[in-house]
Amino acid sequence: MSSVPIVFLHGHTLDQRMWQPQLEAFKDHLVLAPTLRGYGATEPPTKPFSFAEDVYSMLEPYTQIHLVGLSLGGNIALEMAVRYPQKIRTLTLLDSSLKGFVPDEAQLKAGQTVQLAFEQHGLEAAKKVWLGLPLFAAAREQPKLQKQLEAWVADYNGWHWAQQVSPSAAIEDVSSRLGLIEAKTLIVVGQRDTSYFQNVSRFLHQHIQGSKLKVVAEAGHMVNLEQPEMVNALLKAHLA
């Protein structure tokens, strides 16, 4: 077993369970998959905090890590790669978001639609609208995966919507400092993901020196769950 752990950071409204195919594929490795503050069974935050500092505080025993993040988790991973370059041996960004990257009209409208559903009809209505967004169109075509997503999102307490707080509020904007990233970087995006995440992935590839960009066919935003074998193969090659 490698002494360098693989750290998986999940996406918004989800928790560590979204990494099930990867935890199984890398069971011979040391793996850490925390549930981020404000998600899953964790308590809603009561004061300002930093996702990157939360995760970094877990990693004191380790000299280096392999860092993997999807969507919101990718955004956090980017901040960590900029702030703690010596700690990150490899960086893998799956359909990553990026604070400071201007969202397109479709991305803005999606967020507004969910927020409006929460304000007018409550938490369960907002979750239904959230899972009905184009973001999850490809995932909805897999009934088993759709049920998993529904079960995981059911455990999200919705405090971001209740407080009208952006998920990226606890992330530092490193969009102008991507050139500082030293880790060997792999960027993966589903071919069917929305334009915002496609554009972010291309931007990251352009600005992270030596990075590789892989587009996964027949996958949308939840690329690790929609095409797990492909993503696991890409991860194994990258980590090697």
Image: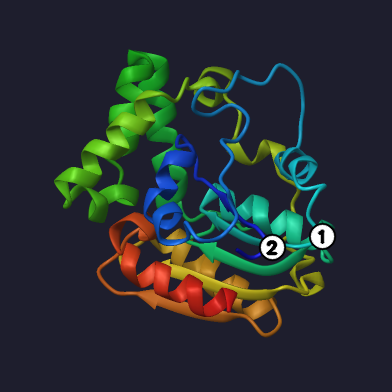
- Residue 239 horizontal/vertical position (percent): 58, 74
Q: Is residue 191 above or below residue 71?
A: below
The quadrant of the rendering that contains the C terminus is bottom right
Residue at the spot of label 1: 63
- Residue 97 horizontal/vertical position (percent): 55, 55
Using the image as rendered, state which of residue 18 and residue 192 is in the foreground. Answer: 18
Q: Is residue 236 above or below residue 63?
A: below
- Residue 184 horizontal/vertical position (percent): 68, 77
- What residue do we see at 73% from left, 73% from top? 183
Mark 2 / mark 1, whichever is N-terminal: 2
- What residue do we see at 82% from left, 65% from top? 85
Q: Does residue 171 appear in the picture of this structure?
A: yes
- What residue do we see at 52% from left, 17% from top? 162
Is mark 2 in CB contact (under 8 Å) with mark 1?
A: yes
Residue at the spot of label 2: 4
Q: How many numbered callouts?
A: 2
Q: Is residue 81 above or below residue 32?
A: below
Tag 1, which secondary structure? loop
- What residue do we see at 82% from left, 60% from top? 63
Which amino acid lies under the numbered mark 1 shown in the image of this protein? Answer: Thr
Q: Does residue 99 appear in the picture of this structure?
A: no
